[in-house]
Each structure stands twice: as structure tokens, then as C-alpha cells.
Amino acid sequence: MKRRLHHFLNTRIFSQFIYWLIVSNVISIILESYASLRGEYGDLFFGFEVFSVVVFTIEYVVRIYVAPIDYPSVNNLQARIRFLKSGYGIIDLLAILPFYLPFVLILDLRILRILRLIRLLRIFKIGRHSKALRTILEVLKETRSELSITFFVAFVMLLLSSTLMYYFENEVQPENFASIGHAFWWAIATLTTVGYGDVYPVTPIGKILAGVTALIGIGFLALPTGIISSAFVEKIKSDKENVQCTCPECGHIIEDK
Amino acid sequence: MKRRLHHFLNTRIFSQFIYWLIVSNVISIILESYASLRGEYGDLFFGFEVFSVVVFTIEYVVRIYVAPIDYPSVNNLQARIRFLKSGYGIIDLLAILPFYLPFVLILDLRILRILRLIRLLRIFKIGRHSKALRTILEVLKETRSELSITFFVAFVMLLLSSTLMYYFENEVQPENFASIGHAFWWAIATLTTVGYGDVYPVTPIGKILAGVTALIGIGFLALPTGIISSAFVEKIKSDKENVQCTCPECGHIIEDK
Amino acid sequence: MKRRLHHFLNTRIFSQFIYWLIVSNVISIILESYASLRGEYGDLFFGFEVFSVVVFTIEYVVRIYVAPIDYPSVNNLQARIRFLKSGYGIIDLLAILPFYLPFVLILDLRILRILRLIRLLRIFKIGRHSKALRTILEVLKETRSELSITFFVAFVMLLLSSTLMYYFENEVQPENFASIGHAFWWAIATLTTVGYGDVYPVTPIGKILAGVTALIGIGFLALPTGIISSAFVEKIKSDKENVQCTCPECGHIIEDK
Amino acid sequence: MKRRLHHFLNTRIFSQFIYWLIVSNVISIILESYASLRGEYGDLFFGFEVFSVVVFTIEYVVRIYVAPIDYPSVNNLQARIRFLKSGYGIIDLLAILPFYLPFVLILDLRILRILRLIRLLRIFKIGRHSKALRTILEVLKETRSELSITFFVAFVMLLLSSTLMYYFENEVQPENFASIGHAFWWAIATLTTVGYGDVYPVTPIGKILAGVTALIGIGFLALPTGIISSAFVEKIKSDKENVQCTCPECGHIIEDK
């Protein structure tokens, strides 16, 4: 029984069904945000939501039940706890939790709305088996410390830049640069080269600072790209490098690096 | 006869003629879009269009006729079908189809206008023989799965970001963030760092989300660049690596990794 | 005594304390910039500032005192001067100087405000021990000359572009393009692809120049990224390349390039 | 005499003088663009211009005179013609030509103003001896064909995108999207992610097209960066690879690639 259920979860047809259910859920969340559609088809949206949650709940319960097959070395309970604590176990839970929560807790409507968003996380269930995604995640993991430092340095730059800008522009534009926090909004739009154009310096010194910030922004774009590039180059190389090297004198084979 | 036509299609003078005809076509489409020019020189534009279509039709028919020379291993009919189904065969057809379609079908003027755009695809006929273009396409092909995953992840980010933003800003700016679809327009302008500035958050929490989205956008810029970079590095290396290094004195072969 | 103090400065608990004091300082500077908070909690901010300066001053004095342990080869005075002239010695001084300056010199309130910003530099004290930061700084140092040339070329481009734009747009938009300096503001926003949208060309020739500038901007983004990428690739390779591969049977050494 | 002049041109002091003269010229051109400064110090600017042209003219004449030392293998006349046709010979000429032209030709004031801009090219005389600049130029030269193809493809994308956008938005915004040329301005601001925000689509289909264009723009940013990155990696590698490889059997040295 357990085996058959486990097999069924991994069949192509069931994966496809879950895939399309997730996609439909995402589309329904988007459509529901249109006031006119919400008014007219509200019941339909709710019905589909109930149906989805029922399916996802059953899937979740079955996955807990069959967990011992995926984690064979331990006893049943431990295997199930392992699944519950794994990344997909948590996503599976988060995907259904927002629906059940209002039954247990009395929640502010505001918080509830935000909670319902978590349903969107269901989309992450799609990426489960992609090799390319794994490669990307590995590269990001390897370059984690360099990337975090880059973002930390960027954050310090943002801080310095927005504090200076606050002092330069506060008097001329007391609205747009009312505080360092306000200036931070400008700084982030500049450093990331988004440049909405809702706030920008008008004093000459402020403009010079903005120019310098934008140029530093170029460097800030270049650094993570360079880090990630080199990690990909390294990854491809190390994937290939299991090649052996034979000593030309005695024929002894040496594992090459 | 077939051979002579085939030879003629590959002469420098004919290629040049087609090249300039395509360029003139593109220029004429652009000029035609100016209302004043369309009014004054409408007949000229139409005349040139008829001339171009006649030339391209003859070229298309001749290319079908001489296809057996390009695909020698099969019989005439199969060779011609092969050409019709090849990339260039389809482009050649699409380049002339929009002109003939209204004679066969009764079409809405709106659809017709869009169809006439397909004429622009003629420009792709220019790239037929570029080695550099082939290198680029090969690199893009090799990195296809990584690039698609990156864009899929970017799409999920866009979705999450725009849904959150919709909940944050909907009340304050019911016009700009009327639905998740509207918020998506903001999200794409932010993640790609375009930043038109027609919509942007005004609430503090919305601004924080926008900042995070812009910073993630930097990562989103870095990933495809890193992937493509490493593929180019790999390509150059593998082009060189077929070299073996033989000792000219004793004939000992050293694998030159 | 000296040894014990030196040991204490390097304990985890003291580092953590300084770390949180710096973070609190940064947060307090940001909060202080909000007019309402400054009005209400002005005394608190001042009190915290005095407390911080006292701590940082004591730390600074102690670090001068224990410098001979960090620079053992020279005599005490020289060791202390060495510390004073080191990067961290200067940061430590700058972090407290703005507080004491008004006692010694009579300063314009304007200058004072800017000086107080230097306090933000305290945040650089955090990065003291990061290996990843050192890697990034080394890469930036190695590519220094290429990067500076890139920025020099970018500067020349900005100059040419803004001068041309000034001649093209000055008559039509005498406000926005009042001088080459004004046009430079536009040029930098375009070349770095920030694009605030407060100034943009309106004449056809100006728009063509803007398009060319934006396309050159792409190249300007690509160059530093390429330079930094290759330096990272090189760095990883050279870190690995010290490995020599010795045949364990006959002792023959093969240079493992 | 010729030798002494040639030596003098290459002295540090003369290079420094020319360097600062060029920098002063650039600054003076920028300052001259401010209407108020032009009014007050017009004579000063003119005097400085005359002085600069005299110096640059003498330098140009002397460089022609001493050319045989730089190109020793040919006779004097050929050596001088060689210098005149070299990159720096042309820049040296262009730097002084605009001053003399009005004496020979009667020129429209408009054209004259543009011509005077050529003076800015003097700044290129500064880069004469930079090794890093040469590295960058070599890399750009090697990747020339890939980069031009990338820009060609980008151009085709711009064309398709702006033509489609023209058809989508022309009716709703007849001002901003009056022709394909107008739409091209939007397309270039989007593909390069500048995003001024003066024109943007308002129809749903137009917004989708804009989003797709912006996403393609990311790819367009990634391609040249990847190409340049790999060329830099290759360059560093080939600079190092003159290392020889010794056959371990007979000791014969083989040039390694």
C-alpha cells in the first residue's frame, strides 16, 4: 500500500496534475485581484481554492505517510519528521496552512490577506526535479560569502550616499529628502540603476554625488556578475577534471587534482 | 539549368542585391509609418512593395526548384520539402505571404496590418552566413536550460513581488496598483532596472519591497551574464583543445590538456 | 597588563559589543535625521553619542597602548606610530574626531554637520576580519589599472556626449541644457542606464545621440564586468595551482599546470 | 637638431605640459558653455584658445619634422606621410584644424560650432602610453565580430519591437508613438534599461511587449559582457602560456601550444 502510493506520487500523470493545479492556482490568485472579476466570480474562486487545498492536503498527508520509503535508513517516525523539516515539506505545509489558520485563530483581515499570499509559494513545488536549477543553486551557494560581502559593501555605500545626500538636499527639497530614510529610497534607485525619477537631486553638489553613486553602481553590478561568472567557469572545469594523469615513466596513474 | 540557377543564387552580386533590397524594405516600412510621407508617397511605397514581393517570390520559387542540389542525398520532392521546412524556407515564405493573403482570405484591416509586419522578418535573411552569429547561437543553445531556469525563477520573483506590492499599495494608489496584473507592470520595470517611473510605491513597506526587488534584479542581471560568460570561456577552450602535442624526437605523445 | 588588554580586545565578547555599538550608532544617525524624532528624543541621541564616543576613545587609546604587540619587531614608539598610520588607525580616529573638533576649533554649523557624517565610517570597522572581503579587495587591486582606464574612457565619452548634446539641445531646452555641466548630468544618467527622466533630449538628432550613448553605456557596463570576471577566474586558478603532483611510486615530479 | 627635438618631445616635462594644456582646454570648453562666464571672460577664453592652437601647431609641425626618427626604415618623405596617416597624426591635425578652417572657408556659424567640438578630441592624446588601454583595445578588437553581431541582433530586436509597438500604441498615444521612428526612441530606452519614462506603453498588449523587450534587454546586456569576459580570460591565459613543456622521456623541450 505505502509502496503503491509512493509510486503513484512519482508517476508522470500525477506530477502533471499537480503542476497544472499549481499553475491554475497562480492564475486564479492573479485574476482574483481584479475587483470586477472578484465581484462576479467570487464563488468560483472560493470553490477552486477549497478544491486545491483539499488536493494539496491529501498530497501532504500521503507524503508524510510514505516518507519512510524516501528516508529508508531510519525508523518510521524519524523519517516522517525528516520530511516535515525538509524544504519541500515546509513548502507543502505553507501552501495549505493559510486556509486552515482562520479556523483555529481569530485573525485580523489584513494579516489574513498577507497569509493567503503564501499560497503563491506553491509555485516552488514545480522546480523539484530540474538539474539546471540545482547547478544554479550550487553556484550561488559556493559564492555565498563573496556575494554577501558585496551586498554588505553595497549597503554601506547606500548608507553613506543617502546620508550625504540628505545633508545636501534636505534644505532645497524638504519633502523628497525629509530624512536619511527618504534619501535611502533615492540611493537604492540610483545604485541599482533603476532610476524611477520620482526623486533626484537638484543642487550641483547633490548631482555630483548622484553621478558618483551611479558610477559606483556600475561597479556594484560588475562585482556579483564577476563572482558568479568565475564560479560557473570553475564548476564546468571541475565537472570535467576527473580525468586521470599517467606518469610517463612508470605508468602509475595519479588522480589529477 | 538547375546548377546554373543555384550558382547564380550564391554569387556575390545576387546576395548583395537581396541584401540591399531587404534594407530598402525595412527603411520603406519605417518611412511609411510617418503619416505625412504615407499621404504623399503612398503609391511609391505600394509600387516598391509589389516590386519586392515579385523579386522575393521568384527567389523563393527558384530556391524550391534548386533545393535538390543543397540536399543531394534524397529524391527531388523530399529535398524540396526539406527546404520548405527549413528555417530559411519558412522565413522566405513568411516574407511574401502577407502580400498574397488578402487575395485568398477576407481579412480584417487590423489583422492585415499586423501581418504586414512579418515583412520585417526579411531582415533575418541577412545573417545567413555569419560565423560569429553561429558562435553566439551555439552558446545560447548550450546554456538554454540554465537560462530558461533563470528566467523561470525571475518570473516567480516577479509574481511574488507584484502580488505583495498589490496588497501593500492597492489602497493608497488604487489606480496604479488596481490588480496584480497592474503591479506586474511595475515589477518588471523594477526587476529589469528599466524604471520608467510611471508607477512606483509610495508606502514605506512598498518602498522596502521595491528596494529588495531592485537588489534581486542585480542578481537577476548577474546570473545570465555569468552563465553566458562561462559558456564562451568553455567554447574557446574546447575549440583549442583538440591539439595533441607530439615530441618530435621520440614520438612520445603527450595529451596537451 | 598590556598583554591582557590586547587579549581582551580580541575576545569574541568585546568584538560583538563593538559590532553592536557601531550598528546602533548607524541606526541612531538614521533615526536622528527624522525631524520629529530629533525633536522628541534629542537628549537621548546626544547621550548615546557621548557614550559611544567615550567607548571608541577608550578603545582607540588602548589600541595605541597595545600596538607594540601587533608590531613586535620595532620599538614601542615606532609601533604606535605605525598603528596610527594604518588604515584601521585612521578609521578609529575619524570615528571620534568630529565629536572633539568643535571644542578646539570654532566651526561653521554647516561644516560641523558634514563632519558628523564621518561617524558613519565606523561601519568599516566591522569588515576587519572577512576573508571574502579581502578576496574582493585583492581582485579590485589587481584590476586597478584596467578599471581606471575604463572609467577614464567612460569619462571622455561622457564629456564628448554631453558637449555634443549641449550644442544640439541648448536652443530648444535652454533650461535643461543650459551648459555642458547641465548636459553632463543627463549624460551620466544615460551612460550608467539610470535614466531618471528629469532631462532627456527632444530633438531628433539629440535622441539619436542619446540612443548611441545608451548603447555605448551597455559596453561600459560590460567592460568592468569582463575585467573583474577574468580576475576572479584567474584568482581561483592561481589559488589552486601551487599543487605539484608527485608520482608516489618513483618520485618523479610532474608540474601540474 | 632633429634628434634633440625628438628627445625633447619625449621628455617628462614636455609630456606633462601637453597633458595639462589638454586638461585646461577641456575645462575651458566646459566653462565657456556657461552663458554668464562666456559673457564676462570671452576674451580670456579666446586668448587661451589662440595660445593652445599655437602650441599644438608647433608640436604638430615638429612631430612631422622628426617623424623619420620614429619610422627609420624609409626615406624622410615617406616617414612623414606615415606619421600624417597614423592615428595620432590625424588626432593632432583634427585638434588644430577647426581653428584655421574659418580663415580658408566661409562657414555657417552652426557648422563652425560643431567643428570646434573636435577640439575635445585632444583628450585622446593623453592615453598615448597606457598599457591597460592597449589591453582593453586588443580585447575589443578580438571580440569585434561577436560584438558587432550582438549589436546587429539588438538592432533587429529594436526594429521589430518598435514596429510592433507603433501598431499597438499609435491609436491611443498618437503623439508619443507617431511613427516607427518615435517608437524606436522608446525601444532603445527600454532595451538598454535606461527608461527615461517620457514615453511608455499604456495598452495591456503594449505593456506585455515592453516587458518582453526589457527581459530581452537583460539578455542583450549579458551577451557582450560574456563575450568580453571570456576574451579577457583567454588573454590572461595566453599571456602566461609561453611556458615550455619538457618531454619526460627524452628531455626534449616542446613549445607548449
Image (cartoon, coloured by chain):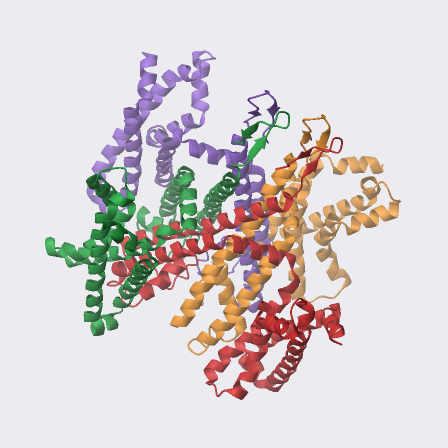
Chain colours: A orange, B purple, C red, D green
* Residue positioned 79% across, 50% down in the render: A84
Q: Nearer the viewer, residue A47 or A95?
A: A95
Work out which quarter of the rendered image holds the C terminus of chain A and state it.
Answer: top right
A245 relative to B86 in the view: left or right: right
A119 relative to C189 in the view: left or right: right
* Residue positioned 42% across, 62% down in the render: C196
Work out which quarter of the rendered image holds the N terminus of chain A and state it.
Answer: top right
Residue C191 position, x and y percent, is 40, 56
Q: Confirm whether residue A13 shows in the render.
A: yes
Does B3 sit above or below residue A257? above
Residue D81 position, x and y percent, is 21, 42
C120 relative to A80 in the view: left or right: left
Q: Nearer the viewer, residue A123 or D143?
A: D143
Does D67 sit above or below residue C36? above
Residue D30, located in which quarter of the rendered image?
A: bottom left
Residue D60 position, x and y percent, is 22, 52
Does D74 sit above or below residue B2? below
Numbered label tally: 0
Q: Nearer the viewer, residue B190 or A155?
A: A155
Does D120 sit above or below residue B172? above
Residue C217 position, x and y percent, is 41, 52
Q: Confirm whether residue A200 shows in the render.
A: no
Q: Nearer the viewer, residue B85 or B238?
A: B238
